[in-house]
Amino acid sequence: MKLSLKHLKKDEQTLLLFTFLYSLGILFQLYKDYYFNINTIDSSCTIIANGMGLNLRIVYLIIMSLMATNILIEKVFQAIWILTATLFFIFFHDFLVCQAGPEKVYMAWNHAMVFWVFLVLGVRKTIGTTRAIFLIKFYLLFSYFAGGVAKIKHGGEWMNGYTLQYYFLQRHIDLDTPLAWNLVANLSVSKIVSYIIVLSELLIPIAFLNKKIEWVFVVGCFIFQGICWYTMKLNWMNYYGWTYLIYASILIVNYIHENSLIHSWIDLA
């Protein structure tokens, strides 16, 4: 029996496409990182898993299995996403507690994003498709705003130029990233870059006032993350970056509608 999409609204088509693409992305990430995630865990520090009597290897395999079947199962039992979110939280909470290395500071952001997206997918029938899409976009953009707030929480020290130099130099020492250090070697340039980053992050809330402004911020953040990846080997795409697929899904669905290809797409589905 064919899956009929004829009666789905654009938002429903967008979320359906995002769910499919996002599931593939996270499944790919889980598969790619399996040995790293499992082998860097010391069973003595797995707080939640130990308390619940869970084997984290089994939990990880269950998460991967759910990611591979969620799209089919959710038609009967959509709350499967809530189960996936819960297991994801349990595993990666303990993983972050046990794992060490220069990337640890970023991993909490990366994995927290996946948990919240899964949770939204699990309650989208209750809150509605439009609100679900808004929340996914909100989580993505709010994470940058939260980063800006964290930078100024203890004063303006983050923008003195030296702080950014310290972070970039440490990345260079840990991961051999000469481009990162060259970018901020000049103190004046480091100060300017610091102010641009913080002000851009703090201005994120205005993105929700206008769709054009929203896209400016989204594209700007994406480019910024690309620069960080290229110069600092900052693996932002791991888990966190797949959330950008919500905007890719919007573009794809809009393109299909605007070019009158929707019926062909429906027939293929």
Image: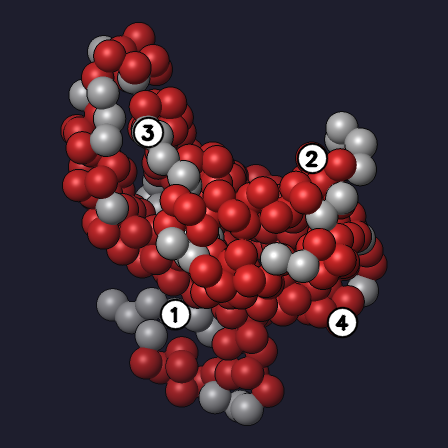
Q: Which residue is mark 2?
A: 150
Q: CA distance from mark 1 to mark 2?
A: 46 Å
> Callout 4 environment at 10 Å: few (<14), some (14 to 19), or many (20+)?
few
Tell me what residue is drawn at x 17 percent, y 29 percent.
Answer: 58
Q: Position of residue 193 (x, y in %)?
A: 71, 58
Q: Which residue is mark 3?
A: 99
Q: CA distance from mark 3 to mark 2?
A: 23 Å
N-terminal of the two: label 3 or label 2? 3
Q: Nearer the viewer, residue 209 or 78?
A: 209
Residue 118 visible here? no
Q: Secondary structure at mark 2?
A: helix
Q: CA distance from mark 3 to mark 1?
A: 45 Å
Amino acid type, label 1: Ser
Q: Which mark is residue 212?
A: 4
Question: On the rendered structure, is 12 left or right of 135?
Answer: left
Q: Which mark is residue 195?
A: none
Q: Which residue is mark 1?
A: 4
Q: Residue furthest bottom?
A: 259
Q: Secondary structure at mark 3?
A: loop
Q: CA distance from mark 1 to mark 4?
A: 32 Å
Q: Secondary structure at mark 1?
A: loop
Amino acid type, label 4: Lys
Question: On the rendered structure, is 115 left or right of 151?
Answer: left
Question: On the rendered structure, is 262 left or right of 68?
Answer: right
Q: Residue furthest top?
A: 51
